[in-house]
Image (cartoon, grey):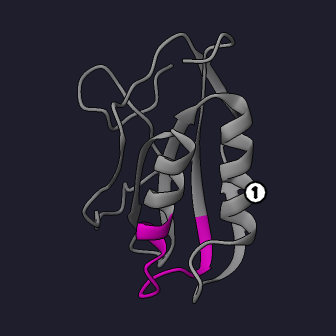
Amino acid sequence: MAADGVCSCQFEVFGKVKGVNFRRHVLRKARTLGLRGWCRNSEQNTVRGYIEGPSPEMDVMKEWLKTTGSPESDIKMVKFSSHRNSHRYGYTNFEIRPDKISQTDGMRGPSNSSNESMRQ
């Protein structure tokens, strides 16, 4: 963990991001940068996720999500939540989660109980 603690944020990527191995590329990039969290497809044809790690690596990942993605993706827009700071990680690695199809599929980070809702 960095001396400054752990930064985290949620993200949602819009555009052509399904059927182009986008999540697999997100997984590889996050692990290369040493970031933790998750990503999944949403029912709105976007990719949503949560990343946590040192601020410099978070900045690299955010720029990558906005400009690179997978080779066949066409990123139109990325939304990020405000950065949160913590003294510890909420995840042990980065993973691709199964698609969640529900009306309440909001952008979430970890929680003490289910790792599904953002700490307050």
Instruction: Name which residue type carries label 1.
Output: Glu
Instruction: Look at the image and tell me in which quarter the N terminus lies.
Output: top right
Q: Taking 18 as reference, is 36 above or below it? A: above
Q: Taking 79 as reference, is 54 above or below it? A: above
Residue depicted at 48% across the width and 74% down the height = 22
Task: Check residue 14 for magenta coloring.
Answer: yes
Q: Quadrant of residue 94?
A: top left
Q: Which residue is mark 1?
A: 63
Viewer-side residue, 17 vs 112: 17
Q: Is residue 22 left or right of residue 33?
A: left
Q: Is residue 108 left or right of residue 10?
A: left
Residue depicted at 61% across the width and 72% down the height = 69
Viewer-side residue, 102 vs 40: 40
Viewer-side residue, 71 vs 83: 71
Q: Is residue 38 left or right of residue 29?
A: left
Q: Position of residue 115 (x, y in %)?
A: 31, 33
Residues packed near mark 1 inside 10 Å, few (<14), some (14 to 19) or many (20 plus): few
Residue depicted at 28% across the width and 68% down the height = 101
Circle 1 — which element? Answer: helix
Residue depicted at 54% across the width and 57% down the height = 29
Question: How many numbered circles does the render carry?
Answer: 1
Q: Residue reaching furthest front? A: 32
Q: Position of residue 81 (x, y in %)?
A: 66, 43
- What range of the chain is rendered magenta? 13-25
Q: Taking 50 as reference, is 66 above or below it? A: below
Q: Position of residue 103 (x, y in %)?
A: 36, 62
Q: Position of residue 110 (x, y in %)?
A: 39, 31
Task: Check residue 22 for magenta coloring.
Answer: yes
